[in-house]
Image: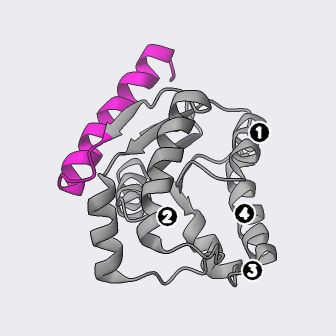
Amino acid sequence: MDARGLAKVLVLGNIGSGKSTFARALGTALGWSRHGIDEARRAHGDGSPAGEARAWAEFLGHAESSAPAILECTGSGPFMDLLRLALRRSGHDWAVLWVDTPPEECLRRVEGRGLDIPYPDFGVPISEVIPMVARNLARALEESWPRPLHRIAGLERTDVEVAHAVQAISDWLARRGAP
């Protein structure tokens, strides 16, 4: 797909929603690079506030660059204003895709695989974090982010969801008159 008309697709979703798996497959389908906050945390984070800031600095650099990319994170939290600013500074339009997996399923997935990401320790068990992230993301999507271009149920086969998302992106580009 021609990326000239759209430089960024932001994939948002809860911890354990399947957003990384979806974003990886979408990047392959579009031929675009993919950057996730969890990879930045693995490279630069150590569970400390400073490590989290280093991870976000890398992630925000990808958001601000002019290169087409799939970006994925939860979409809520203390760095979201900076993420929106970085996306605006990229000079290109961007779209939001929402992986809306039910919190109970997210928790089941996380409990089944564990977490190998150096998140900062906020002293709250994951069983409380996931419902909190779901509430915060729902509020952020209503108040701070543009309306999602496409909602991914998070329970379907990835290839099916990617095909629907690619069609939504193609339709959006066509409405905008992108080359």
- Residue behind mark 2: 129
Q: Looking at numbered disc 2 in the image, what kind of residue is underneath it?
A: Val
Q: Looking at numbered disc 3 in the image, what kind of residue is underneath it?
A: Ser
Q: Looking at numbered disc 1 in the image, what kind of residue is underneath it?
A: Leu
Mark 4 closeness class: few <14, some 14–19, many ≥20 residues within 10 Å: many
* Dot 1 or dot 2, earlier in sequence: 1
In-image side of 146 versus 154 (left or right): right
63 up-or-down from 170: above or below: below
Nearest to the observer: residue 161 or residue 99: 99
Magenta residues span: 152-179
The label nearer to you, 1 versus 2, is 2
Q: Residue at x 68, y 46 (%)?
A: 80
- Residue behind mark 1: 85
Q: Are marks 4 and 2 in contact (CB under 8 Å)?
A: no
Overall secondary structure of the magenta section: helix
Point out residue 12 in the picture as x, y percentages from the top left corner.
Answer: 48, 48
Q: Residue at x 25, y 43 (%)?
A: 163
For the residues marked 3 and 4, what is the alpha-carbon distance in whole angstroms?
A: 12 Å
Q: Which mark is residue 136?
A: none
Q: Are marks 1 and 2 in contact (CB under 8 Å)?
A: no
Q: Are marks 1 and 3 in contact (CB under 8 Å)?
A: no
For the residues marked 2 and 3, what is the alpha-carbon distance in whole angstroms?
A: 17 Å
- Residue behind mark 4: 56
For the residues marked 1 and 2, what is the alpha-carbon distance in whole angstroms?
A: 26 Å
Point out residue 48 in the picture as x, y percentages from the top left corner.
Answer: 75, 80
Within the image, what quadrant is residue 123 found in?
bottom right
